[in-house]
Amino acid sequence: MSRFLPHRFALHVVLVILCLVTLFPLLWMVTAAFTPQDQITAKALRFWPEDPTLGNFTEAARRHPIWLWLGNSMLTAGLITLGKLALSLPAGYAFARMEFKGRDTAFWIVVATMSFPSVLAIIPTYIAVVKLGAFDSYGAMIVPMIPYVGFYVFYFRQSFRQLPASMFEAARIDGAGIWKQFVQIGLPNVVGSIAALSVISFLGAWNIYLWGQLVLEDTTRKTLTTGIAMFADLDGAQTPWGALMATSLLSVLPVLAVFLMAQRYIVEALAPGLADK
């Protein structure tokens, strides 16, 4: 083991350097969010402002409805996550525990949708949204994002298949129907998987940018991710870096908090895959 120690040490040094390089933009964003506007572009690089201020948050709120955008982000990300779970959980259970004609074929068709680039569906979906009169609405932002559940169905199917068949057989003997088996036996035993995919879905929905820019026009309906772009589009005026970084920090904190609270479930969900490496 000892002769490999220098290699491990060198590897750790490289990883630490790469981590610092990766974290540098985040550190600069946090520093700039609390730095007065006239000091942000100073030549001397500082990792913490000399005169910390909350004025950038006030300035951001004066320019745009950032707190309303924060609420919109919470609403859309939460509903997209609930929609994905409502679709993928019953589907995963059906593919894992029910017998019906064409089950395996249907499952692999669902899995095959994972290889379909979602960007190819943007234009047809946009035309459909406009023709249905849903343009510039929360529905246009939320509903088209829900059906992308190929990975969720696959993952939940594997989770339900890992449960002992004897539990479902015992419930069936006691007279429990399919729905009761799903709700009372299946769901309570895959809570960890549900938590992990809920967080992953929430993080993904929170960061939706391109679709939001296409279908959300009213300033009051924008999310934080799409609204941030309005700070940089001032027709040649000086970009308010302080307000921009304050809003960016505001967009990061909720997802960071959600990730930290649920990181145990994410690690548990990914651990089998990591162990196979």
Image (spheres, grey):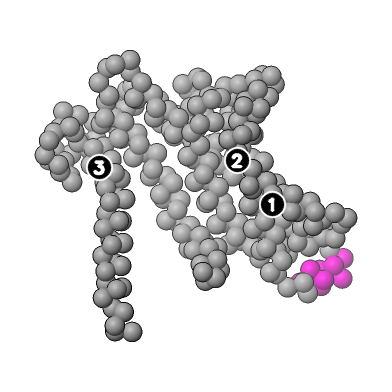
Classed neighbour count for the residue bearing mark 1: other residues with Cα under 10 Å, few (<14), some (14–19), many (≥20): some
Q: Position of residue 50 (x, y in %)?
A: 12, 40
Residue ID for mark 3: 28
Disc 1 to disc 2, C-alpha distance: 13 Å
SS type, badge 3: helix
Q: Nearer the viewer, mark 2 or mark 3?
A: 2
At label 2, the amino acid type is Pro
Name the residue type under label 1: Val
Query: Magenta segment, which residues?
Result: 167-175
Cα distance between the residues tagged 1 and 3:
40 Å
Amino acid type, label 3: Trp
Mark pair 2, 3: CA separation: 33 Å
| 28 with respect to 46 (left or right) | right
Is 206 colored magenta in this rendering? no
Neighbours of disc 2 within 10 Å: few (<14), some (14-19), many (20+): few
- Expressed as whole percent of the image width and height from the top left, the position of residue 143 reads 64, 34
Q: Earlier in the sequence, mark 2 or mark 3?
A: 3
Our reading of the magenta stretch's main secondary structure is helix
Label pair 1/2, CB-CB below 8 angstroms: no
**Dot in front, 1 or 3:** 1
Q: Quadrant of the N terminus?
A: bottom left
At x 27% / y 47%, what residue is drawn?
Answer: 24
Mark 1 highlights which residue? Answer: 111
**Residue drawn where x is 49% and y is 63% of the image:** 267
Instruction: Using the rendered image of the protein, determine whether residue 258 is visible from the camera's viewpoint.
Output: yes
Q: Residue 193, position in %: x, y?
A: 60, 60
In the image, residue 248 above or below residue 20: above
The residue under label 2 is 117
Q: Left or right: 61 with respect to 127?
A: left
Q: SS of the residue at dot 2?
A: loop
Residue in the image at 28% along x and 51% along y: 21
